[in-house]
Image (cartoon, rainbow, N blue to C red):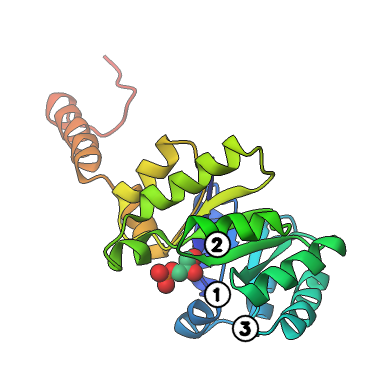
Amino acid sequence: MEFYIDCGNTELIRHYINNFNLKGITCNPTILIKDGGTIQEVLDTAPEEMELYFEVIATDHKRMIEEARLLSSLRKSITVKIPATPEGFIAIRELAKEGIRTLGTAVYSVQQALSAAYNGAKEVAPYIGRIDNMGFDGVKTALDIHRAFTVQNVDCAVFGASFKNVAQVNEVLINGVNKVTLSTDLFEKYLTDANGIRAAEDFKSAWKSAYGTEHLFISR
Ligand code: G3P
């Protein structure tokens, strides 16, 4: 199981690197804009071995390929996100021939995922929350893709993205998807179970009322 953050804010990236067993960082152009970060700043903040996912902004295959070559030359641990469009499939295919690792992104359907994988993407990112917001079932789409890859023996992984709530994350992980990227807001919710925090506080105050100390080892 691998947890990533969808983030371009270097302070938050540093926080999660220091406090959580984070596998890596995913970005897209709007995340970088929203978080006020640059690709270089993310690179400067993340350790060399950390998995990084950056996305091209071009929409035609020629420029996608150029941008992808540049991105992948920055660091070995970079996977290039290419939108799963007809132009993107051409780019993915060419980049696969060059040994450049790609992820098919902006995936809203099984056919987009299969087309990206068929052309050589090693991962695809179904936009689970966005699919839900269109009135469809994002988790089901992600799990259908996962099942199709398994049944067809396709060497491509589902990387769950665009989650809007904790239940969606749990549902895909329970059903075999093992990579997920969460916004930092959702990540906080994921890590914070109010009942667990309350129980821990209750244990401590019971101890303190019984022994008059917060120290675990008491002397008699
Ligand atoms: O990684 C998913 C992201 O690129 C899109 O997420 O929150 O804009 O739907 P969101």
Residue at image position (54%, 53%) is 159
Q: Residue furthest top?
A: 220
Q: Earlier in the sequence, mark 1 or mark 3?
A: 1
Q: In front here: 116 or 6?
A: 116
Q: How many marks?
A: 3
Q: Is residue 78 left or right of residue 69?
A: left
Q: Which quarter of the figure has residue 183?
A: bottom left
* Amino acid at pointer 3: Ile
Q: Which quarter of the figure has residue 155?
A: top right
* Amino acid at pointer 2: Gln
Cα separation, mark 3 vs mark 2, equals: 18 Å
Q: Residue furthest left?
A: 209
Q: Is mark 2 within 8 Å of ligand 1?
A: no
Q: Earlier in the sequence, mark 1 or mark 2?
A: 1
Label 3 Cα neighbours within 10 Å, binned few <14 / some 14-19 / many ≥20 = some
Q: Tag on residue 28? A: 1
Residue at image position (43%, 36%) is 175
Label 2 Cα neighbours within 10 Å, binned few <14 / some 14-19 / many ≥20 = many
Give the secondary structure at mark 2.
helix
Q: Percent position (x, y) of residue 131? A: 36, 63
Mark 1 or mark 2: which is in front? 2
Q: Which quarter of the figure has residue 74?
A: bottom right
Q: Is mark 3 within 8 Å of ligand 1?
A: no
Q: Which residue is mark 2?
A: 112
Q: Is mark 1 within 8 Å of ligand 1?
A: yes
Give the secondary structure at mark 3.
loop
Q: Which residue is mark 3?
A: 57
Cα separation, mark 1 vs mark 3, equals: 9 Å
Label 1 Cα neighbours within 10 Å, binned few <14 / some 14-19 / many ≥20 = some
**Vertical side of 85 occupied by 142: above or below:** above
Q: Which quarter of the rendered picture does the C terminus lie within?
A: top left
Q: Which quarter of the rendered picture does the N terminus lie within?
A: top right
